[in-house]
Image (cartoon, helix red, strand yellow):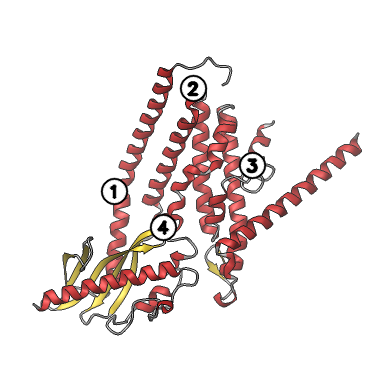
Amino acid sequence: MSKWNILTKGFFKENPSLILVLGTCPTLAVTTSVNNAIGMGAATTFVLLMSNILISLLKNVIPDKVRIPCFIVIIATFVSMVDLLIQGFVPALSASLGVFIPLIVVNCIVLGRAEAFASKNGVWDSILDGLGMGIGFTISLILIATVREVLGAGAFMGHQFIPADYNILIFVLAPGAFIVYGFIMALVRHILNKVEAKRKAKCAVAK
Amino acid sequence: MSQKKEASLLRLVVVLTCIALVAGMALTGVYALTKDRIEAAQKAKKEMALNLVLPDFKGTLKDTTITPDGEDDPVLAHIALNDDGSLFGLAVETFTKKAFDGRFDLMVGFDADGSIINTEVIDASETPGLGDKINKDKSNFAKQFNGQDPATYKLSVKKDGGDVDAITAATISSRAYCDAVQRAYNVYQKVKEGNNE
């Protein structure tokens, strides 16, 4: 796999929340507004990147038997750091993301990449993988949050352009999260299938 | 990794301990680095809240702690006295334990007659998009309390027979807000009693 592929596979082809269906809890919970989505995406990307780097560096030191506790300790440390830093430097974001920052610890995207990629690959590849997966996660959060915020709150990034009387409240609530998540998942898969079919057709012609 | 020799028990313990130790030290460092800033941010928020719930107040603040009847937790109240010693009002750092996320903290300002001047959220982690509408920048819910006298204004949501319009889809947070304001009013009455004696 080329370096470019390692980075970009997380964007759509192996998008953690839309294709691999990992980390569904934050995907559904924080996507009520685009600002929350960006904050959550950035925090998760940072944790993913740092834990991937450290775990790929330590992969030969950590014995197989205790690898999961080791990964969890490393991930939890970075999450607590992010939590403290956000509280100290961007208190407004910490107020709006609330409990979801500490919950990155149990986000299976982070542990999933540590187990499936960083513990088997070198540092550079793990950096690209962590970045790609983080960006992919952020993209899907922003996609879902945009639909939910526009339909549910009549706003984009906090700027209201549809009066509150015409908002469809269900899209801000939990059921709306599932509806939007399902439709976006289907849409992305449909597009990816189309692209794949086109690529195959081209290969067949070339033969 | 699977081709490696089976690691000894000692090695398992040493590696895990070392990782936990380094993690602990790194966290201590970040905590020390951010502690002052977090405290400063919280203090600034509290001072801002004080200014908001007691606007135009220039006198001195006297702090007192009051435990409302039938409760265990003391509540911090700032008695605002004018320069001539008369009562300007009272700012109460109240809280509720009935919130969706367990607990949130509010600051409530009363004038000398017991009417609510203003309420302000100090610390809350209600659900983003729903319960967090108790914040004034998210909805007008909290503004309905301003200028009301709890002696005649029933502090519970309309569903429960009160005078407060609840936030749509966040009844628990709305009830909790009323609970916190009611606790603040109980403290106000106790302070007033103490002053008259």
**Tag 1, which chain?**
B
Choose between B84 and B197: the one closer to the eye: B197
Secondary-structure class at tag 3: loop
Choose between B75 and A127: the one closer to the eye: B75
- The residue labelled by disc 2 is A63
Q: For mark 1, does the 10 Å Cα neighbourhood hold few (<14), some (14 to 19), or many (20 or more) residues?
A: few
Tags 3 and 1 both on a single chain: no
**1 and 4 marks in contact (CB < 8 Å):** no
Secondary-structure class at tag 2: loop
> Where residue A34 sits in the image (x, y, percent)?
55, 59
- Number of numbered tags placed on the structure image: 4
First in sequence: mark 4 or mark 2?
2
Q: Which mark is residue A95?
A: 4
Secondary-structure class at tag 4: helix
For discs 4 and 2, the disc positioned in front in the rendered view: 2
Q: CA distance from mark 4 to mark 2?
A: 39 Å
**Tag 4, which chain?**
A
Q: Amino acid at mark 3?
A: Gly
Position of the C terminus of chain A by quadrant: top right
Q: CA distance from mark 3 to mark 1?
A: 38 Å
- The residue labelled by disc 1 is B36
Q: CA distance from mark 1 to mark 2?
A: 39 Å
Residue drawn at (60%, 71%) of the image: A168
Q: CA distance from mark 3 to mark 2?
A: 28 Å
Residue A192 visible within the image: yes
Q: CA distance from mark 1 to mark 4?
A: 18 Å
For discs 3 and 1, the disc positioned in front in the rendered view: 3
